[in-house]
Amino acid sequence: MLICGIDESRRGPVLGVMVMCGAMIEESNLPKLIKLKPKDSKLLTREERE
């Protein structure tokens, strides 16, 4: 089974620039992804994101 996630980011007034991104992973690889400890970028500082 495939697991899919999508997200969007908007910059600018009203519906200015919009970027959308998606990722898919095989369910069997999910434990490997969890080991990487992905984080919500909103919880990171600008320096940590870059």
Image: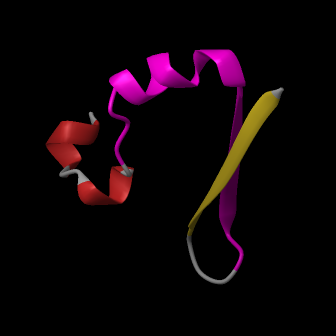
Residue situated in front as seen by the camera: 29 or 48: 29
Q: Quadrant of residue 42?
A: bottom left
Asked if residue 30 lies left or right of residue 37, the reply is: right
Residue, x 66% and y 16% (percent of image)? 28
Image coordinates of residue 38 in percent, x first then y, are 38, 36
Q: Is residue 36 magenta?
A: yes
**Above or below: residue 28 compared with residue 9:** above
Left or right of 45? Residue 13 is: right
Q: Is residue 34 above or below residue 6?
A: above
Residue 45: image x %, image y %?
18, 52
The percent coordinates of residue 44 (x first, y second) are 23, 51
Give me the residue at 38% from left, 51% from top.
Answer: 40
Q: In the rendering, at what x and y percent does residue 22 appear?
A: 71, 38
Segment tinted magenta in the rendering: 15-39
Please tell me which residue is depicted at 56% across the width and 72% down the height of the picture. Answer: 12
Report the quarter where the C terminus lies: top left
Give the residue at the far right of this rendering: 1
| Above/below status of 13 relative to 35 | below
Between 28 and 42, the one lying in front of the other is 28
